[in-house]
Image (cartoon, helix red, strand yellow):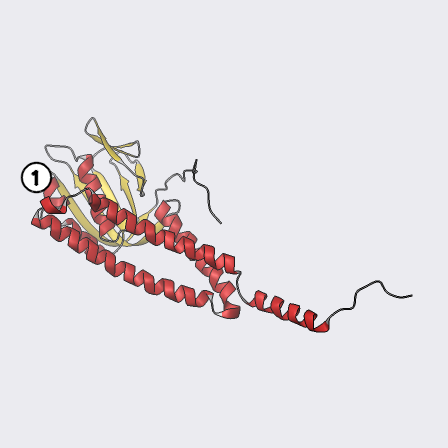
Amino acid sequence: MESDREPVDEESERATEDADGDAGAKPPRRYISVLAMVLVAVLGFTIAVQIRSHSEDSLESARTQDLVRILADLDAQRSRLSDEIVELELARDELASGSQGHKAALERAQELADAVGILAGTIKATGPGIELVFIPGDKPIRAAVMLDAVQELRGAGAEAMQITGANGSAVRIVAASFFAESDGDLLVDRVRLTAEYRLIAIGDPETMATALRIPGGVEDTVKKDGGTVMVRQPGTVDVTALADAAEPEYAEPVD
């Protein structure tokens, strides 16, 4: 009985097997593209925060000490971005390294997930950093002053922050955090904090401490109001407060 099957082209079979073998050796091209887009998004987020913190200030009317502070912040930002570029180029080379690419992509994806979790405030963090204690004097610590302190720390490379009040309430500070005042207390993301305030930041301790002590900066402002800012460098600090991960209402991911 004759078979109804079509004759098989042996060369086509071998070509298909070779293609399958190559596909198994390398991670899917779409996977690498999506991962690269997320890495670029993280960089863009960092740059946007820095630009936003200074965009409202007019450079033409800024004081000399303000210009010095902005220049120092931008120089530190440029140095960090240069380091990140080198890291991303190394990651790109690993992702394109043939049979090891898939494993490298998974490891890189986990590292990225951890980094995004720290930035979003959804996971705890530990590392070198500083602890600031804001003690009010005749006047309460103003919300604007605390916001300035957060921006100064961000500009100096702070990667994770939280603020705790004397009443024990703690708030993770993220990009969307906001500060307000109510009856002499601070409201941070609608959570009431009573003085004195303890602000913890993970990053390079010396760089952050220097940024806060620039003439005309946060320390000087608090002193003018009769208060005190104590800067401590305990070595390793822990950021344990978590932020609620808000579900986007309108935005959707794009393939």
Give the answer, above or below, for where 189 lies relative to 233: above
Q: For the point 9% across and 41% down, which residue is it?
A: 223
Position above or below: 163 against 194: below
Residue 164 placement (x, y as % from top left): 27, 39
Tally of numbered discs: 1
From the top left corner, tell me how far across and down residue 39 is, in percent. 39, 55
Residue pictured at 16% horizontal, 43% vertical: 57
Q: Is residue 171 visible?
A: yes
Which structural element holds mark 1?
helix
Quadrant of the image occupied by residue 192: top left
Question: Up-down: is 248 above or below 83?
Answer: above
Does residue 1 appear to the left or right of 60 in the view shown?
Answer: right
Residue type pointed to by label 1: Lys
* Residue hosting label 1: 224
Q: Position of residue 247 (x, y in %)?
A: 43, 38
Q: Within the image, what quadrant is residue 219 found in?
A: top left
Residues 44 and 238: in front is 44
Task: Indicate whether 57 appears above or below 92.
Answer: above
The residue under the point 46% across, 45% down is 253
